[in-house]
Image (cartoon, grey):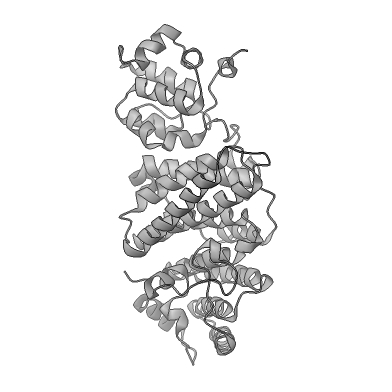
Amino acid sequence: MSDPHLSGRLSIPLSFWSRAEVLHALEDHDAGALFRLVRQYCGASQQAIGTAVELAQPHVSRIMSGKQQMTALWSWQRVADGLGMPNEARRMLGLADARSVYVGGNSRSGAPAAATGDLWSAARTVEDIAEITLKDLMKRREALAAGALVVGAALTETLEHWLLPPRGILGRGKGPLGEAELQRIEAATVALRHWDDRWRLGIRRKAVVGQLSEVSELAETTQSAPVQARLFVVMAELSKIAASMSYDAGDHPTAQKYYTLSLRAIHQAGPEHKLYGVGVLADMARQMLDTKNPRDALDISRIALDSAQAHNAPPTVLAMLRTREGWSYAGMGRTAAYTRSVAQAEELLEEGTSEELPSCPGSSAPGTATSPSARTTRRRGWSTRDRRRPTSPRPSGYATRRRSATGRST
């Protein structure tokens, strides 16, 4: 039987390039280590690697054994082209960007991103998580410098897809991931969530992004539908943790990207996790308020309210969303609308219990969430400012100053 990799460029998933050992091989310009990793994770033979990078099999063997080094820039160019390296990997080697979009085993086909499938589909969600974590891990400073906060219709029209039903889970077959390994992944996510509670300002952020990248690689492979759904839950929570850490570090563009990825991932996990998604939307609305975009905060709050009401959210959750709505009106100078939203929030609080937004996807049913600490609760969306019951309208300038005085604290 012939080697399926011999037909041309190897089929390498985008998530491969975000592995720590691959990054080290690229940093060291170690072609032997890179080829060994391609064989280990992609199942490619020496012959297949040689065919892809235009080297004879004995030459590949000597490089992989460490008997020969690759130093010429043009040789690395052939390797980059043959393995289909994304631009971030090419830059680590000192190479120019590829002329076409990266083509990998489970990634884009070369068409522009806007024309490739549905942004909210399972496949695109996994693909985008793999791509964004790759960029984050490989070129963190560059990503920070180039990022920009998305506002207006470009943001809100994208988020409105949250209200539509998902298009199904990626896998429908039986995959290699067992229950024991899946439970270990979920336990690691819980540990990382506690890291977010204790260490802020991005100190542990890279570990969270790395774990998210690893899980996205598992989600790219064929898994059963229940396993795939649980992987999406894990990716949603890790994305939200990364967003929270980025937010605390003052990196709003990156935080927004991860919030959106979290929302798209939990969208695929099933209706039982909808209230967790409502919490993500609440965080995004809060971000728009803190960055002085009250109109976008209002639109996001309304999307969250529609979803919360459709899934029987407890009154305290609805009250929190009404305060988001009220502060949005205040930021726009709409005093009467602000007063109306505050009154609705107060009525909901009067009839409400201690139920709040779920602190993790597994506690999405009303009544199952435990009360988190004040700091964690503030970061997850039910802030100290939201708990206050303003009794009289204030002008727009007052609301802005008030938000600055009671914003996110460390």
> Could you tell me if residue 54 is visible in this image?
yes
User: Quick check: 368 left or right of 80?
Assistant: right
> Could you tell me if residue 253 is visible in this image?
no
| Residue 148 position in % (x across, y down) | 44, 53
- Residue 197 vs residue 28, the one in the foreground: 197
Give the total number of marks visible in the rendering.
Answer: 0
| Residue 155 position in % (x across, y down) | 56, 58
| Residue 46 position in % (x across, y down) | 46, 14
User: Quick check: 282 left or right of 137?
Assistant: right
| Residue 116 position in % (x across, y down) | 63, 40
User: Quick check: 290 left or right of 159?
Assistant: left
> What residue is at 57 percent from the left and 63 percent from the top?
277
Say which quarter of the image contains residue 23.
top left
On screen, residue 233 above or below 197: above
> What residue is at 58 percent from the left and 56 percent from the top?
266
On screen, residue 181 above or below 70: below
In the rendered view of the protein, which quadrant contains the N terminus? top right
In the rendered view of the protein, which quadrant contains the C terminus? bottom left
On screen, residue 188 above or below 50: below
Q: Residue furthest bottom?
A: 391
- Residue 397 vs residue 289, the one in the foreground: 289
